[in-house]
């Protein structure tokens, strides 16, 4: 029982870590879209509006990427902290989480 629980917790943490990396890549992709839009639309369309609007788009793209890196590092630290607690759950907590503990109410 104990090794099965530990394996599940390891796998759950690994899935969470991979989801965190996927989210970081989505932030980077979105930020790059804004950077490309800001840097090329002023060149392609060649109007004053897009020349002026390009700078805020570039700034927004950089902010999105920085936000992604910040969230990634914050969540990565949280994942590493939870990795230290693998196998430390009590039997009562596990039964409660499974919903198999029927005698919670006092008689």
Image: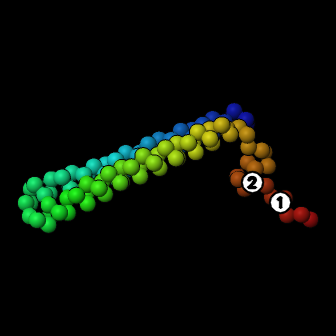
Quadrant the N terminus occupies: top right
Who's the residue at 71% across and 37% down the image? Answer: 87
| SS at mark 2 in the image | helix
Left or right, residue 78 beside residue 37: right
Which residue of the protein is positioned furthest toward the top in this rendering? 3
Between 99 and 47, the residue placed more toward the observer is 47
Callout count:
2
Q: Quadrant of residue 11?
A: top right
| SS at mark 1 in the image | loop
Rendering coords of residue 74 (x, y %): 52, 47
Mark 1 surroundings within 10 Å by alpha-carbon count, few (fewer than 14), some (14 through 19), many (20 or more)? few
Q: CA distance from mark 2 to mark 1?
A: 9 Å
Rendering coords of residue 103 (x, y %): 84, 58
Q: Residue 75 — which label? A: none
Who's the residue at 20% across and 59% down the image? Answer: 54
Mark 2 surroundings within 10 Å by alpha-carbon count, few (fewer than 14), some (14 through 19), many (20 or more)? few
Circles 2 and 1: CB distance less than 8 Å?
yes
Q: Earlier in the sequence, mark 2 or mark 1?
A: 2
Who's the residue at 9% across and 56% down the image? Answer: 44
Query: Looking at the image, can residue 97 be seen?
Result: yes
* Pointer 1 residue: 104
Q: Is residue 28 above or below residue 84?
A: below
Between 107 and 44, the residue placed more toward the observer is 44
Rendering coords of residue 20 (x, y %): 47, 45
Q: Residue 96 — which label? A: 2
Which residue of the protein is positioned furthest toward the right in this rendering? 107
């Amino acid at each position: 029982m104990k090794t099965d629980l530990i394996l599940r917790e390891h796998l759950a943490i690994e899935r969470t870590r991979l989801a965190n990396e996927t989210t970081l890549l989505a932030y980077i992709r979105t930020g790059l879209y804004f950077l490309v839009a800001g840097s090329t639309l002023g060149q392609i369309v060649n109007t004053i509006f897009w020349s002026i609007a390009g700078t805020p788009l570039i700034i927004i793209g950089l902010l999105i990427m920085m936000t992604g890196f910040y969230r990634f590092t914050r969540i990565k630290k949280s994942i590493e902290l939870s990795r230290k607690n693998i196998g430390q759950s009590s039997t009562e907590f596990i039964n409660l989480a499974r919903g198999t503990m029927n005698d919670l109410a006092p008689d």
